Image (cartoon, grey):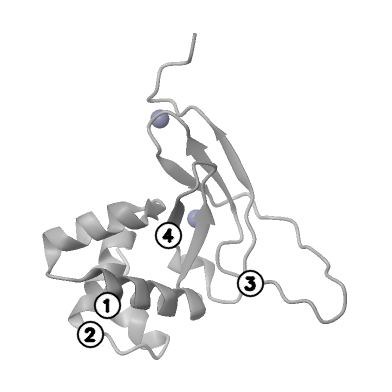
């Protein structure tokens, strides 16, 4: 697995124990986690307060280390995919299971490039498919 400390250093982010722990939670999960799930897993590793988690996730996001996806259930998920590089983080589709709430990255499916009017800037984009995962019985 990618070393969280090295990854932070490579982006000029000071690898404090808390930042390492947050990034490890996301890397170990291997799939996007909701804020709640991230916080719960983080608390199993270390003492952390909510504000620090918010701040550091926002920092990771600004540096392109983490991307977030808004689920059709209204909850943001955070995802770390260091292999993707920082130029266009999150440039892949996602799938959300409406039954168990699990979200997976469809890393081999890039999102189409969007062309914007002059003066507009993209700060994020997402392509979300939702339905049922293989672990959840089909409905009806
Ligand atoms: Zn499911
Ligand atoms: Zn993803």
* Mark 2 secondary-structure assignment: loop
* Mark 3 secondary-structure assignment: loop
* x and y percentages locating residue 62 in the rendered image: 50, 79
Separation of marks 3 and 1 at Cα, in angstroms = 23 Å
Separation of marks 2 and 3 at Cα, in angstroms = 26 Å
* x and y percentages locating residue 138 in the rendered image: 47, 16
The disc at residue 123 is 3
The disc at residue 78 is 4
Crowdedness near tag 2: few (<14), some (14–19) or many (≥20) residues, C-alpha within 10 Å: few
Determine contact: label 2, label 4, CB under 8 Å.
Answer: no
Image position of 17 (left or right of 15)? left
* Mark 4 secondary-structure assignment: strand
Image position of 111 (left or right of 46)? right
Location of residue 113 by image quarter = bottom right
Crowdedness near tag 3: few (<14), some (14–19) or many (≥20) residues, C-alpha within 10 Å: few
* x and y percentages locating residue 88 in the rendered image: 61, 71
Residue at figure coordinates x 56%, y 62% from the top left = 90
Closer to the observer: label 3 or label 1?
A: 3
Closer to the observer: label 2 or label 3?
A: 3
Determine contact: label 4, label 1, CB under 8 Å.
Answer: no
Of callouts 4 and 1, the N-terminal one? 1
């Amino acid at each position: 697995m990618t070393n969280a400390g090295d990854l932070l250093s490579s982006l000029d982010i000071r690898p404090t124990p808390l930042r390492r722990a947050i990034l490890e939670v996301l890397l170990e999960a291997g799939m996007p986690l909701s804020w709640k799930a991230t916080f719960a897993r983080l608390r199993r590793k270390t003492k952390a307060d909510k504000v620090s988690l918010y701040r550091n996730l926002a920092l990771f996001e600004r540096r392109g280390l983490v991307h977030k996806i808004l689920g059709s259930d209204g909850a943001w998920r955070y995802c770390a995919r260091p292999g993707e590089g920082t130029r266009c983080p999150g440039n892949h589709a996602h799938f959300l299971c409406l039954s168990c709430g699990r979200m997976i990255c469809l890393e081999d499916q890039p999102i189409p490039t969007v062309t914007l009017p002059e003066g507009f800037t993209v700060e994020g984009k997402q392509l979300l498919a939702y339905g049922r995962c293989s672990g959840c019985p089909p409905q009806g």
